[in-house]
Image (cartoon, grey):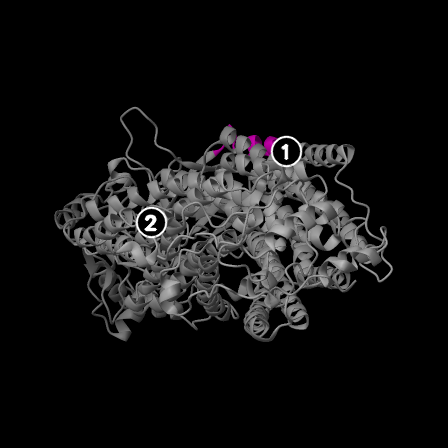
Amino acid sequence: MSTESQTTTESFESFESIQRSQVPAESSSHHHEEPTGIWSWITTVDHKRIGIMYFMTSMFFLGIGGLEAMLIRIQLFRPDSDFISAELYNQLFTMHGTTMIFLVAMPLAVAFFNYIVPLQIGARDVAFPRLNALSYWIYLFGGLYLNASWFFGAAPNTSWVGYANLTSTEYSPGLNVDFWVLGLSILGVSSIMGGVNFITTIINLRAPGMKLMRMPLFTWMTFVTSFLLVTALPVIAVALILLAFDRFFATNFFVVASGGDTTMWQHLFWIFGHPEVYILVLPAFGVISDVIPAFSRKPLFGYAVVVYAGVLIGFIGWGVWSHHMFTTGLGPIADSFFVASTMIIAIPTGVKIFNWMATMWGGALKMNTAMTFAVSLVGMFVLGGLSGIMHSSAPVDLQQHDSYFVVAHFHYVIVGGLLLGMFSGLYYWFPKVTGRMPNEALGKLHFWLTFIGFNLTFFPMHFSGMYGMPRRTWTYRAELNVEIYNQLSTVGAFILAISTVVLLYNLWKSARTGEKASHNPWGAPSLEWSIPSPPHHYNFPALPQVRSREPLWHEDERKEIEAITLAEPEVEPEMPNPSFWPIVLAAGVTLTWALVMTGRWWAPVIGLVLTAIPVYCWAFEDPFAKKETAHG
Amino acid sequence: MRFAKLLGGLLALAVLAIPVAAQQEYPMSTIAPASDFAEGIHSVYVQIFWWAMGILTVCWVVLAYILIRFRERPDSPRPKQIHGDARLEIAWTVVPALIVVAIAIPTIQTVFQTQRAHPDAFVVDVIGHQYWWEFRYPQHGDVVTANELRLPVNQPVSLRIWSNDVIHSFWIPLLGGKRDANPLRAVPEGKDTHYSWIHMTPSETGYFLGQCAEFCGESHSRMMMSVVVETEEEFEAWLDDWRAGHAVPGTQTAQAEVAPMQAAGFAAMPVGSAQETAAPAPPTDPRLLEGYNLFVGQCVACHGIPGDPNAMASVAPDLTLLGRRERIGAGMLENTPENLVRWIRDPRSIKPGVLMPGVDYEGGRAPIVWPAFPYSDEQIESIALYLTSLR
């Protein structure tokens, strides 16, 4: 750090000097060889490896969900098309929605929770490393189980909301809904465990001095999201269990002839479903709340307000669910209540947008790929939010509900919010994870293809919806005159598909041949940038003392912290052993649910046995036992 | 800078779309109201639309300015490390809150206005079926029709909406918003079951297209319907024609003929209207008579022509005055004998998942499966001619 003296105090060069002066992490000798090979990944309990596996798996499912979307878009290129059958179309759009939400969007965010949060708060791992591995394996197996339905020609076909009573055995006698109800039940288990793990981690494992109000925004939003996971997922679990009882044990929760109530499904689903929207989008808000200050060279404007706005969104998100049900016929008083609560939630969301813009105002914006994605989120989310305001008005929603206008809206929120934010985070933390810099030229190409493809796909849907095209329709009549908008959307979808290929190529290429990254290549302020890139498996040799919100932007504090975090430990910290039981237990859990499908009462018992054995072994496994002495 | 250019490009795309829109006809446009209900919605929409455009413009202009003005340059000084400003935070909390109030007031007014029945309104029952619509006029005798709802212009009407099977949603965009058709739940005695309502007064005559807007199964995308809004005289004339339909005496024998069918498992069939109205005279033209006989021999298992005791079923769309409808197949095809032949021969090629069997295959859903039609091409044509003659 000898170059510090040559920087003038007022010059912006001081940030550059932070970056240049650092020894690339690679040069520090690795005294500990991390195990490699498939077995080490299967048994890993390291949050970083689990994060990478979450990311890879969600990219795999992104490919599947994207392929489904492409088939949908080809089918809709022309009116009255019969490129694919109505039945296949219904399976495709159901699986597209289910896959993108449960197998791509949520796990993608969880990938970042896993890799980044412990590093940001100065922890060596999450609170429950084996539980973390179990979450991942259940997610993987649940996703595979759900997609196995394709091989039975019986993929779910009642849309991702699965409204009763279309899902009853009377109207959906096949295996399709069985796969859906059981698959989602399995995935819910994974999400709830993840939520518990991150709440505990963030509460208990912060480094000394890392007060709650000093946590980076991404950790804050992970914290809020985890509470939403733990509270919202059980609601859909209840709904799914009721539906499973209806289907497998002939109960009558949603059978109207016996006094069952189809509207109850809608309430249960959306009490989960609306917090779910914030589960999806708050992590992205967290990412860009870290990225924007880092590349504006300014602290986040109104830190406390941005935190409270996020918490407020999490709370109010529980009181808006019936705005998905304005057409159900709940009456004017209920409608008015949910109009009001929905409009109120726009206020904290707007506050976040204004604070991001104020953060950039007066800054020195470094428009690299990560920052470009973050800024585009701000621009696009405004559009998605405003179309949301339109159908927060119940009368207007009566026209727009279940039309392509709504499809346009939530893709602006989910792709324009969550996905752009996740891409921003991906480029931002890429050097930390791989130790190499992402290729900027390819990154910019990826951005522009994504940005153009995204807008070309979803902007015209506002028009097809406004001119009366309902969603979830296999085909449309030429006389509606919405063909041109559908064709634009299809062209846009192809551009989006190409952009994904560019992204994957960039990731592959940069991870192998990218420029070596120093431990803090961006000159960013938070704790994850104080350790080598990539981090040691124990993250921090010793725990640093944090004294401010931007610890690495204060010279004294930075030197103090880096003296600890970049040092070679005298005694290597003891980390939990790898364990084989999470994957076995996950297989047992998945099998138990899957065997319910057989309709034989004893079949799931086989799965339960396969669940009980690993639970027993897990309980008596000493996670810290030395390998040599464990069986001594 | 490039970002700003692209935003400009996007706006240009939007602007380009407007003249394209102006030249075209949009039979299901949500922004071309033809009833007081649609008008109420539209006025709220327009207000919110302009608020949204204003906010969008402010946000994008400020964002574009920031991206141009505050971009990093070689000589950029170190930015001032500002942590926040309480006055600004209050300002951009209060201003959006005021805008929200400005939007909420007309919204909630409209919510209450559009859910109030007009005191002079007459009721029409709208019943969703997989994949067609049944319309009943309880205050006009037992008039019933399918897929094409007829309403008199400038007369308030209350649509009482429910479903016979899964959830559907009744949506005629030019006449207003959609309302779900929920299956009626069995409720304890004394409690009212829960209907959805649309209260409106159509303000223009015309032929208005609509479509089911809640995913309801395989052929959801083919579940269309329309509303014919006509003058009061035309509407009354249609009602009269409907009632007169096929009126000739012969009620007693009619009842007797229905009985075996009820015994065969159609207990739920309504018998009501047969007492007052009379059975139709079979057509005299030999070709039509052949069609009629074939129709009575097969189709009446599901289809009804009230007034004709031989055709009492209500499982499938009512076919009274079918020849007068503009479309068949729940809005899929123009109503011509050729299309009718196409439909009878192979309804599934037009609406996959439909219950009606074709010539080559059986129809239905377990446990009830209707046998395939045993008809020749010529026989199908006769049926089509007979049905087209019902005007």
* Labels 2 and 1 positioned on one and the same chain: no
Q: Which-is-in-front pick, marks 2 and 1?
A: 2
Mark 1 Cα shell of 10 Å, populated few (<14), some (14-19), many (≥20): many
B348 vs B6, nearest the viewer: B6
Q: Is residue B248 visible?
A: yes
Q: Which residue is mark 2?
A: A185
Residue A487 vertical position relative to residue B78 in the rendered view, above or below:
below
**Extent of the magenta region:** B104-121
Q: Chain of mark 2?
A: A
For the N terminus of chain A, the quadrant is bottom right
Q: Secondary structure at mark 1?
A: helix
Q: Is residue A88 magenta?
A: no
Residue B65 vertical position relative to residue A41 in the rendered view, above or below:
above
Q: Is residue B233 visible?
A: no
Residue A252 location in percent, x, y? Answer: 25, 40
Q: Quadrant of residue B194?
A: top left
Q: What amino acid is labelled 2 in the image? A: Ser
Q: Quadrant of residue A302?
A: top right
B321 vs A609, nearest the viewer: A609
Q: Quadrant of residue A436?
A: bottom right
Marker disc for residue A608: none
